[in-house]
């Protein structure tokens, strides 16, 4: 138990490292010539990374034989929501100055904003139902079904990033490949689990 607590504490500190790095860059005035764009891109990239980390927990725990990794999935998912919230706040506050009319026009008319807003909205029920109490109230199967929205969140996040960049698509393509591999792994596991298991042949009774 003590080792688990220390591991969780270290993981929590590691998840906070990006925001401390951003704060340090702000303090030392290293946010580039366009600080709003830098903060928006920084928080958005880390949101997508944490979504990928969340998706990677289940395959890694099975492939590496480390079942205890599942203990970190909820925390990583909540940090994805945390950085996604910072990303949205940066856009609403620093970029649009709470101009709801302009924000709504962006959501409706700019496809990459639409995709990003969709990804954030999908994260809301995931974050709200991440507690043990919600798992009990919803039941394991319904909770798992709801939390498959993270797959759509990952796809929407990649599309948002891909449509955002104008020329160099290497980074969004990289994250798209990661999300694709992780989803293909889940699809392969689901197909394998649906295959009927061969009937166990009973040994002939001996007289």
Image (spheres, rainbow, N blue to C red):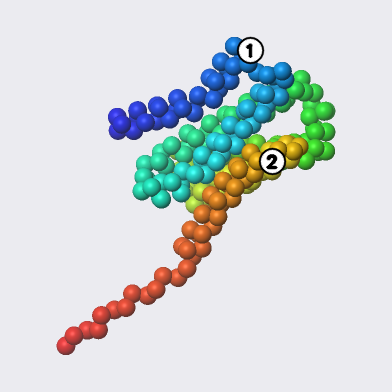
Residue 60, placed above or below residue 103: below
Front-most of residues 151 and 30: 30
| Residue that extends furthest to the left in the rendered view of this protein | 207
Residue at figure coordinates x 36%, y 48% from the top left: 65
Tell me the element at label 1. Answer: loop
Q: Earlier in the sequence, mark 2 or mark 1?
A: 1
| Residue that extends furthest to the bottom in the rendered view of this protein | 207
Front-most of residues 192 and 121: 192
Q: Position of residue 85 (x, y in %)?
A: 62, 28
Task: Answer left or right for 52 relative to 72.
Answer: right
Q: Determine which residue is flagged by label 1.
A: 29
What is the count of numbered marks?
2
Residue at figure coordinates x 76%, y 37% from the top left: 166
Task: Answer left or right for 76 relative to 2.
Answer: right
Residue at figure coordinates x 56%, y 34% from the top left: 80
Residue at figure coordinates x 80%, y 37% from the top left: 110
Instruction: Locate the C terminus by quadrant.
Output: bottom left
Q: Determine which residue is flagged by label 2.
A: 169
Q: Position of residue 182 (x, y in %)?
A: 53, 49
Residue 95, placed above or below residue 143: above
Task: Answer left or right for 35 relative to 136.
Answer: right
Residue 99, can we see it?
A: yes
Q: Which mark is residue 5?
A: none
Q: Position of residue 5 (x, y in %)?
A: 35, 29
């Amino acid at each position: 138990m003590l080792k688990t607590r220390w591991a969780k504490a270290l993981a929590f500190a590691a998840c906070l490292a990006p925001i401390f790095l951003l704060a340090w860059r702000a303090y030392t005035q290293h946010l580039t010539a366009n600080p709003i764009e830098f903060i928006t891109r920084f928080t958005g990239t880390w949101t997508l990374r944490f979504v990928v980390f969340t998706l990677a927990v289940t395959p890694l725990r099975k492939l590496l034989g480390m079942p205890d990794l599942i203990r970190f999935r909820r925390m990583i998912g909540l940090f994805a929501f945390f950085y996604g919230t910072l990303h949205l706040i940066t856009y609403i506050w620093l970029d649009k100055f709470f101009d709801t009319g302009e924000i709504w026009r962006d959501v409706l008319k700019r496809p990459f904003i639409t995709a990003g807003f969709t990804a954030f909205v999908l994260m809301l029920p995931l974050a709200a139902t991440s507690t043990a109490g919600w798992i009990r109230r919803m039941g394991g199967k319904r909770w798992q079904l709801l939390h498959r929205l993270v797959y759509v969140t990952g796809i929407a996040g990649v599309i948002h990033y891909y449509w955002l960049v104008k020329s160099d698509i290497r980074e969004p393509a990289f994250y798209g490949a990661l999300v694709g591999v992780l989803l293909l792994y889940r699809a392969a596991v689901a197909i394998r689990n649906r295959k009927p298991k061969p009937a166990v042949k009973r040994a002939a009774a001996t007289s």
